[in-house]
């Protein structure tokens, strides 16, 4: 293979791993995970913040099965279900993203992303187009949410249901109003001195969201959560294996010198790699990242086997939401799967 074609194929592989897309779809941009414009990065870091702490498991981290990114747009292909009860994940997504006025007596925090507006429903009801109404005009920031195939309802039904829920609970929907509501501009204009700090964190949040599929493709953590704690981004991952497998593979891809995040690992506390470490349950490996001009932009914590040996609940939920069999076989030790299957069969016979 020539250098050029091997380079192109490595780039294609990185793109497939970080976007969750099939390699057959083919990479059409020069960078596998292009950087977002500043306004787009603001939008995406808010999206990550809103979806990063989902109350229950989906088939993929944060319910994002795959994505496509460009400088001023991001397309997210969503999972259909969330949790053992198979709640609609697209509806949960709207409840986290779409802004409304706060319910009376619940403080000033705007639920959802202030300034986010629905611009239309396309592709036979499967695509929801959104844009961010920014304070400085002329900066485009767009988000496209795509429903999974086979879902019996379209975005109009889901949006209608969420609108009714808001109205029944004393919230006024803002996502189709033409101008910013005073509660939104109040939020957007608050603490302008935090702007530059916020912009740097937004760039990291957006870069992370654009590589979110590295978690299911490069690792098999059965749960990943992420939040912005005002100093840095925190990622909390859980693995069902007694030694925290895969974290180095993930770090290598996250910090890829050419296509990775603009950060590197600054401090590393790995307990599974200690040569004399006993076969231990419940340990945590931690990694602190920095960039050339700033410390502690990102922090990754990997908990190995926090639930002990019993993963029945997690396996059951992941089956319910349609996680792939191959991925499940990698994520859970064989013994955990057998334990779940035997209990499941016993319940069926009862
Ligand atoms: Zn480790």
Image (cartoon, rainbow, N blue to C red):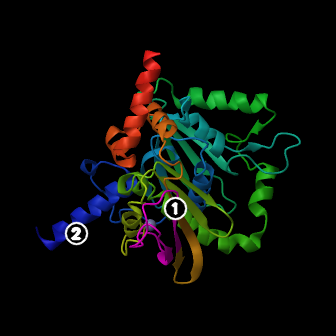
Asked if labels 2 and 1 touch by Cβ distance under 8 angstroms, the answer is no
> Quarter containing ligand 1?
bottom left
CA neighbours of label 2 inside 10 A, class few (<14), some (14 to 19), many (20+): few
> Within the image, what quadrant is residue 140 found in?
bottom right
Secondary structure of the magenta portion, mostly?
Answer: loop
> Within the image, what quadrant is residue 90 found in?
top right
Disc on the earlier residue, 1 or 2: 2
Most extreme residue toward the right is: 105
Query: In the picture shown, does residue 55 fall above or below 290?
Result: above
Image location (x, y in percent) of residue 242: 43, 56
As helix, strand or loop, the secondary structure at mark 2 comes to: helix
Residue 128 visible (yes or no): yes
Front of the two marks 1 and 2? 1
Query: In the picture shown, does residue 111 fall above or below 313?
Result: below
| Viewer-side residue, 284 vs 71 | 284
Image location (x, y in percent) of residue 102: 80, 43
Tag 1 residue: 283
Which residue range is magenta in the image?
Answer: 260-288
CA neighbours of label 1 inside 10 A, class few (<14), some (14 to 19), many (20+): some
Image location (x, y in percent) of residue 267: 51, 78
Image location (x, y in percent) of residue 15: 33, 59
Question: Going by the image, does 311 lie left or right of 186?
Answer: left
* Quadrant of image for the N terminus: bottom left
Tag 2 residue: 7
In the image, the residue with mark 1 has its CB under 8 Å from the nearest atom of ligand 1: yes
């Amino acid at each position: 293979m020539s250098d050029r074609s091997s380079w192109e194929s490595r780039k294609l592989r990185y793109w497939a791993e970080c976007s969750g897309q099939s390699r057959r779809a083919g990479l059409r941009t020069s960078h596998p995970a292009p950087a977002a414009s500043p306004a787009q990065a603001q939008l995406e870091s808010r999206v990550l913040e809103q979806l990063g702490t989902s109350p229950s498991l989906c088939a993929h981290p944060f319910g994002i099965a795959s994505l496509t990114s460009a400088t001023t747009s991001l397309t997210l292909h969503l999972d259909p279900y969330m949790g053992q009860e198979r709640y609609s994940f697209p509806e949960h997504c709207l409840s986290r993203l779409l802004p409304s006025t706060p319910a009376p007596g619940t403080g000033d925090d705007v639920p959802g992303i202030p300034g986010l507006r629905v611009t239309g429903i396309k592709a036979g009801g499967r695509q929801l187009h959104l844009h961010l109404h920014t304070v400085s005009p002329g900066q485009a920031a767009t988000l496209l949410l795509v429903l999974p195939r086979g879902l019996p309802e379209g975005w109009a039904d889901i949006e209608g249901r969420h609108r009714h829920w808001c109205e029944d609970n004393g919230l006024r929907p803002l996502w189709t109003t033409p101008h910013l509501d005073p509660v939104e501009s109040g939020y957007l204009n608050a603490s302008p001195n935090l702007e530059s700090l916020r912009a740097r964190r937004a760039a990291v949040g957006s870069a992370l969201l654009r590589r979110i599929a590295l978690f299911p493709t490069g690792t098999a953590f059965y749960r990943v959560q992420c939040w912005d704690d005002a100093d840095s981004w925190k990622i909390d991952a859980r693995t069902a294996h007694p030694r925290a497998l895969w974290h180095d593979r993930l770090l290598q891809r996250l910090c890829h010198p050419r296509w990775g995040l603009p950060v590197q690992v600054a401090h590393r506390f790995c307990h599974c790699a200690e040569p004399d470490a006993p076969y231990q349950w419940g340990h945590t490996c931690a990694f602190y990242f920095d960039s050339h001009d700033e410390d502690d932009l990102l922090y990754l914590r990997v908990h190995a086997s926090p639930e002990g040996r019993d993963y029945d609940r997690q396996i059951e939920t992941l089956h319910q939401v349609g996680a792939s069999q191959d991925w499940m076989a990698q994520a859970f030790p064989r013994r955990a799967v057998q334990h779940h299957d035997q209990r499941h069969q016993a319940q069926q016979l009862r």
